[in-house]
Image (tube, rainbow, N blue to C red):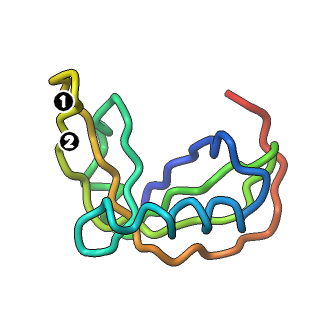
Amino acid sequence: MALNILKLCVGADSVEDLLKWQAQHLGHWPAGRAEHITRMWPKRGEELLAGGSIYWIIKGAILCRQKLIRLDEAIGSDGIRRCAIVTDPELIAVAATPKRAF
């Protein structure tokens, strides 16, 4: 069974905002894939990569998802190791589901 991630999409007011932001940054990511950098490495990474997705919470509702491709190590400019969650660039709309901030 696949495991999924919920992430707050800070700064976006809509799915279109997220799509636009990711399109503007495609040149920064390898192979044209979208990345989300996070401080913590997922403990259940293998389960996430077995068909999981990142579900984006935008303005208090889960509105879309992206399939997870892989987890890469990313070293920040401060030298700290982080996790780059590499996703498929396609945003898949889902039924709007209310979700409070956590």
Q: In which quarter of the image is the N terminus?
A: bottom left
- Give the structural element (helix, strand or loop) at label 2: strand
User: Is there any visible trace of residue 1 in the rendered image?
Assistant: no
Residue at 15% x, 24% y is 79
Q: Residue 84, relative to residue 39: is it above or below?
A: below
Q: Residue 66: x, y in percent? A: 51, 67
Mark number displayed over residue 90: none
**In the image: residue 22, left or right of residue 76:** right
Disc 1: which residue: 81
- Give the structural element (helix, strand or loop) at label 1: strand
Residue at 32% x, 74% y is 32
Residue at 24% x, 74% y is 31
Q: Residue flagged by tag 2: what amino acid is it?
A: Ala
Q: Residue 71: x, y in percent? A: 25, 53
Disc 2: which residue: 74
Residue 46: name its quadrant: bottom left
Distance of label 1 from label 2 (alpha carbons) = 6 Å
Marks 2 and 1: in contact by CB < 8 Å? yes
Of mark 1 and mark 2, the one earlier in the sequence is: 2
Q: Residue 52: x, y in percent? A: 43, 63
Q: Residue flagged by tag 1: what amino acid is it?
A: Arg
Q: Residue 41, relative to residue 5: is it above or below?
A: above
Few, some or many C-alpha atoms within 10 Å of disc 1 (few <14, some 14-19, many ≥20)? some
User: Is there any visible trace of residue 31 in the rendered image?
Assistant: yes
Q: Residue 85, relative to residue 90: is it above or below?
A: above
**In the image: residue 43, left or right of residue 90:** left
Residue 92: name its quadrant: bottom right
Q: Residue 100: x, y in percent? A: 79, 35
Residue at 37% x, 42% y is 37
**In the image: residue 85, left or right of residue 22:** left
